[in-house]
Amino acid sequence: MDHLAFYNLAEHPFSNAVDPRYFYNSTQHSDALIRLKFAVDTMKGLAVVVGDIGTGKTTLARRMLNELDENLYEAALLVVLHAAVTTDWLMKKIAMQLGVENVSDDKIEILGQLYKRLLELSESGLKAVVLMDEVQMLQSREIMEEFRGILNMEGPNGKLINLVLFGLPELDDVLALDEPLKQRVAVKFRLSALDASVTSSYIKHRLHIAGSDEEIFLEDAILAVHEYSGGVPRVINTMCDNAIFEGYLLKQKPITREIIDSVALSLDLEKST
């Protein structure tokens, strides 16, 4: 019997891999989605979501992508993997993701192709949306200027594209590299850590999705998870994942505060509250 079977779980409930089934629609995430959908539905142009490491920005971005009706939107999600991204590469990637065929290697031609494609989408009744994650890595004035240029593209019915940027708080400084772009932010949302009550609901939600029908964590243990994690979802997942395995080794049901204290010690975590 492994640790999942010991706790009657069908799968790992606390993986940090993004899985839309485990999305927890907290009040702030629901509020963020409502505001972002309003931004793209009304073609505001530029929306921004910022939050500290592990607060759920990537999960929110993927959730939004999944909820954009393909009959109404032509949407794409790009994830910035490193800071060496060039303007040419980024513009080409955006064009490809929005359906431009045989994308040129010349930036001027790419912009022409992109404009033509955006007009086609608009004429067919579709709204173009590009979601972009980890944008704080794009510390380039040139790229910010290109974003502004894309947002300037308009057709007979108005703006042709929405950009929704997700990133760490440093994203504010990156946008400031081009002040006119920063002034175009129409909707902005800041994700924060979860409070104790929401942390408890979040943990129970993930356990339920994984097949749990019993109490696996004592309430005091859940409170300890919140105290050590500070309500950051990624840290909550890591702590709970370790606690389930530790509890299995100790053959302890349900998981106690003492197990959480032990896990926190092994992860070098200190209480934040």
Image (spheres, rainbow, N blue to C red):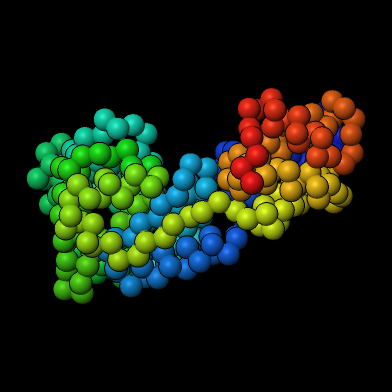
Q: In which quarter of the image is the N terminus?
A: top right
Res. 267 in view: yes
Q: In which quarter of the image is residue 252?
A: top right
- Which residue is painted at 40% across and 45% down in the image? 168
- Which residue is painted at 82% across and 35% down in the image? 258
- Which residue is painted at 21% across and 74% down in the image? 157
- Which residue is painted at 71% across and 49% down in the image? 203
Residue 271 location in percent, x, y? 65, 39
Res. 74 in view: no
Q: Quadrant of residue 216?
A: top right
Relative horizontal placement of residue 181, taking residue 24 as reference (left or right): left
Whether 122 is drawn above or below 180: the answer is below
Pick the front one: 18 or 187: 187
Q: Quadrant of residue 251?
A: top right
Residue 255 location in percent, x, y? 83, 39
Whether 12 is drawn above or below 117: the answer is above
Relative horizontal placement of residue 205, taking residue 140 as reference (left or right): right
Pick the front one: 154 or 249: 249
